[in-house]
Amino acid sequence: MIGSALKPHGGDRIAAALDAHGVRTVYTLCGGHISPILVAAKARGLRIVDTRDEATAVFAADATARLTGIPGVAAVTAGPGLTNTITALKNAQLAQSPVLLIGGAAPTALQGRGALQDIDQKPLIAPHVKLVKQVRRVKDLGPAVTEALSTARAGVPGPVFIECPVDLLYEEATIRQWYSDAAGKGASIADRALRWYLNRHAARLFSGAHAPLDSRVPGISVPRPGENAIARAAEALNKAERPLMVIGSQALAQATNAARLAEAVTRLGIPAYLSGMARGLLGRNHPLQMRHERRKALREADCVVLAGVPCDFRLDYGKHVKRSATLIAANRSAKEARLNRRPTIAAIGDASLFVESLSERPGAGKARDAWTSALRERDQTRETSIDAQAAGSPGPPTEHVNPIAFCRALDRIAGDNASFVADGGDFVATASYILRPRGPLTWLDPGVFGTLGVGAGFALGAVIARPDSEVWLLWGDGASGYGLAEFDTFVRHGIPVIAVIGNDAGWTQIAREQVKMLRDDVGTVLARTAYHEVARGFGAEGLEVRHADQVEETLQQARTLARAGRPVLVNVWLDRSDFREGSISM
């Protein structure tokens, strides 16, 4: 193995700490500042997945974290390598994903002196992470990884950052020789002083570097909601005639607890709406899961449980819940539990543990057949309306593919082991109304930040975290532009993702309202690009659908190719629709 005969170096200490914490994959875009980390991690059996953009590496780490509960890890080089990750880091922060970003840095003795890619990285990264750890001695590399991984998972999960200067990562003799060469051989007082300073600096860098690494992994304490809040919430629910629950991504912070959470929701017997990472929690056809008319249901409910959901724009800043209703907020974050609307009962702690505790209280499962039936009937009415829109209006056939009919077909054809990654505007939002995730943790979207460009990284992370899943990447044609080059990554690493591009030649979600309100489509028009040919250029399979009669056969072909280990891109020419008229949120 290349690198197997190398002497120990700082990269080994980082790799050993990652290995001890159960990290199995490191996502990266290579750079000289971080090469020892990648080589050492590979030597320990960790999988190194190199991408074409640093943001993709962080998005992939984010997806891995969400699906496994183990922090996802990305390693990037200094300067521009790090700045390229900021959007992805912010997305992870707002989605509360435990991600560890390891960044290279200029040599410690040259920082601030114009070294290659040397910038002050801390102020750029600090606002977007829970912890910034700037390591200055080799012996501190392992403990920094342990602290960072623990911090990422504790309390409200989120991303963390470790800065590792390059002179901490290579083996000691190499660095000492580098500093010796930098000091020169001059005999002047200034030359001798420089040699003394650099020798002393190197001695400090490597002091204690050969001490055994402490591989102990500290336990993570999951914050439990208080008993008083649980008791009050149980009493309020027992009195309620029209209770409703909204379950969000934070309730899945313990990814391994998803099945227990689903069982608890069933025991409670309360109609539930699922959002974000909670989509699919109850499977495809659970009698308690409601999919449509959430705003109307919230306004009718007399008791609302928000499990891992803040009152942000998605709930109209709390206005969707009527003032006379009992509002119960279970959230790891006290700030989010009280955001924009003070709850009647605030249960500060893990939302899934809260729901489990409620489900075990006397009176859980109280029948409210009339209320549940009314919501189901409303759901069915909306489904019938969607079917009518999928069928289209009477008259001559449309030129291309009805997006609603396409999503109905995809939902029928995708396998029972399908996972869906959502990255886009209008096409993806339409799909979110129609597709039925198959089970817990089978839906990935960016989260509250609404970031475009997550798709390639999320799909990459999903396939690696769940290699037995059939991963569908739903791309708007606009959003696909951020990640098409990652088909190179998919091909090189054997990632059999099925990407579907909804090609309607525009940024349609924006154009619909912009043209109506401002009477100008400036900046919203795209071309009917041959995206499938781009995928072929990277060595993947490319398929094209222009008409409705091609849909089912092509989607089945895509599944067959993916099962054979081939990444596939399906370029679907869509007609425009008014399915989401008036959908812009602020």
Image (cartoon, rainbow, N blue to C red):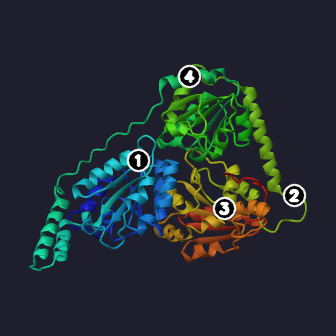
Disc 2 to disc 1, C-alpha distance = 51 Å
- Which dot marks residue 152? 1
- Figure check: 257 above or below 127: above
Which part of the image, by quadrant, shows the N terminus? bottom left
Dot 3 or dot 4, earlier in sequence: 4
What residue is pinned by disc 4? 232
The residue nearer to you, when weighing 20 against 242, is: 242
Residue closest to the eye, 482 or 345: 345
Residue that appears at 81% across and 54% down: 389
Q: Is residue 20 above or below residue 513?
A: above
Q: Earlier in the sequence, mark 2 or mark 1?
A: 1
Q: Nearer the viewer, mark 3 or mark 4?
A: 4
**Circle 3 sits on which residue?**
556
Sequence-first disc among 3 and 1: 1
The answer to whether residue 417 is left or right of residue 169 is right
- Marks 4 and 1: CB-CB under 8 Å? no
Residue under label 2? 393
Q: Where is residue 44 in the image (x, y as percent from the top left)?
A: 30, 59
Mark 2 vs mark 3: in front: 2
Mark 3 and mark 1: Cα distance apart in space: 40 Å
